[in-house]
Amino acid sequence: MLSETGHLFIFASTFLSLSLIFFSIKEIKGNKKSSFPVIVSFSKFQLIFTNLSFLTLMGGYIISDFSIVNVYENSHSSKPLIYKISGVWGNHEGSLLLWINVLVIFSFLFFKKNNKHNKEFSLFTLVFQNILILGFFIFLITTSNPFSKIFPIPLEGLGLNPILQDPALAIHPPLLYLGFVGSSIYFSAALSSLLTKFSGKDFGTIIKPWVLISWLFQTLGILVGSIWAYYELGWGGYWFWDPVENSSLIPWFLMTALFHSVLVLEKRNGLYLWVIILSILTFTMSVTGTFLVRSGILNSVHTFANDPTRGLYLLIFLSLMVFLSLYIFYRYAPSENKKFELFSKEFFILTNNWFMSFFLITVLIGTIYPIFLEVLTNQKISIGPPYYNTVLAPFLIPVLFLMGYGPKSSWISSKPVKEKNILFILVVSTLLSVILIYFLNNKNFLINLVLIFSTYLVLQTIFDLYKSIKKKHVLNYSSNYSSFFSHLGFGFLIFFISLNSIMSIEHDFNLKIGEKKQLKNITINFKKLDSFEEKNYQKIVGEIEVINAQEKTTEVLKPEIRVYNQPETITYEASIKSNILSDTYVTMSNISKENIYNIKFQKKPFMNMIWLSTILIVLGGSFRILTRKSL
């Protein structure tokens, strides 16, 4: 019954997408009888039916309807309710249905907000958005049907991948989808703007909140995914440059550049075409990431499937999308004055954009180069942190300085900022950092420079806010709270990442029960093992005592080995003792039948400060949404 209902909602939504394209084009042509009321009604029904299709699939998971293949392959009757629900998007078919829902939600909200004042522009945006929706509905129906039936009906399901049975993974995918799938709306709006010759400044004002909303969700999604990988996958760090991690980071670079460019576009039209390009590229890179994840050509814990048919469809769809965008851009793009005064705010924002573009290209090359190398030479390689740290870190230094210097500049004016405090704060930052570097005994010149300039950004941002409040410009400055918190959060983020890389301790060794391992001032005592039966898995819990002679502390950590039956999987759960300054991190895995266990011990400083710094960045973006004036 649920399968038939789900199919009905999907086909109804597909028909409505076709109808919206047809009636919108008819309305644009200006027929005597207006189709606008029909378009408004169909847009509402499209939202309702698409959401109902997703809720129907969710209902199948909740009641364990194993007549649906998707539920059978990804759920189990003994799973807790939260993981039954999160299992809806913990697979290719369900996540694709969620993707379509996000496309439709953004389409409906954008059209509702703008159709009264910018009718032609809104209608063209609706057409392009529904072309995307229709394309993904065809993909869903032909290769990824979430409501396919199975007969005879199994008595029990196969279960969800155990590493996905986690609260963070319940919210990580929806947040990311609201981020990079949300970028579809300004992709469609950009093409519409070119066709309708919509004013650059007006275009910037309209898309700014949508860019900001998608950027906020993308940032939160990346943060939650990073925290999940830290404690669930046993990586022991905040970021490992996994190919699918990179696929979420690439659109984030573009969103960041786009939002800063929109700020310029609101003041003058010089960056109109650049904003159009970034709007198109952001969603294009999102679909590219989806192609990499769902085609099976990436090797990652995050990948959904290994199906050449799906990969081929996405590649064709991506190619058509790119060629359509290129045609419209070169056919309808106007000429514009792109000259900006040196040392003006526009110049510094554009410089920020070029750095973001460089970071994007670096990450993109690191992600796809191994793929091309394997295709051309059959040689398999992986590109990890050393490549990214070596290439990106030197360019991070000028970015940190410009983030502190740029906001002090003026629009249009070419006069450089003349404030003594810049040099003073830079000197203070250098002195403080040198003292810190001396006590840490760090000899890595590049990391030391990053530490100095991240300190400068933090101090400069705090000083600028203090100066603004002192001059009683609080009301005028309220629209810049976004910049203050985001830049301060970014400065802290890089500062604590630098300290983390300098001060981290990592050791990998083997122990038997009852043995000890001496690591300078730290003693690792493998005291005992216990076994427990849980609802859907068995767990072996180690008790490991960590004695720090220097800090005069004793911590007891209990890493786990979990054995799941549905599906048959073994996972290794980290045990983490966390405080504001440092994390003690231990994982345990069995390597033989002789009770010898591999112990991975790490001391990770300032992990919580890294997460809090990212939250501060998100808080900055939230101010622009909560403050109407800034929108």
Image: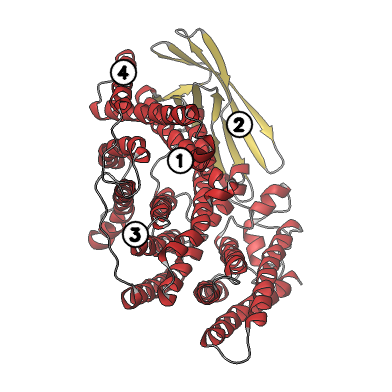
Residue under pointer 1 = 483
Residue under pointer 3 = 271
Q: Is residue 595 left or right of residue 362?
A: right
Looking at the image, residue 67 lies above or below residue 341: below
Residue 314 pos. (x, y %):
44, 70
Q: Is residue 449 left or right of residue 268?
A: left
Q: Mark 3 and mark 4: span between their CA atoms?
A: 42 Å
Residue under pointer 4 = 437
Q: Mark 2 and mark 1: span between their CA atoms?
A: 48 Å
Q: Mark 4 and mark 1: span between their CA atoms?
A: 29 Å
Q: Nearer the viewer, mark 2 or mark 1?
A: 1
Disc 3 packing (10 Å; few <14; some 14–19; many ≥20): many
Q: Nearer the viewer, mark 4 or mark 2?
A: 4
Which of disc 1 and disc 2 is earlier in sequence? 1
Residue 32 pos. (x, y %):
60, 92
Which of disc 1 and disc 4 is earlier in sequence? 4
Q: Of helix, strand and loop, which one carries label 3?
A: helix
Tag 1: residue type? Answer: Ser
Q: Residue placed at 52% from the left, 77% from the top? A: 120
Residue 23 pos. (x, y %):
59, 84
Residue 144 pos. (x, y %):
55, 70
Residue 540 numbered mark, or none = 2
Q: Mark 2 and mark 3: span between their CA atoms?
A: 59 Å
Tag 2: residue type? Answer: Ile
Which of disc 2 and disc 4 is earlier in sequence? 4
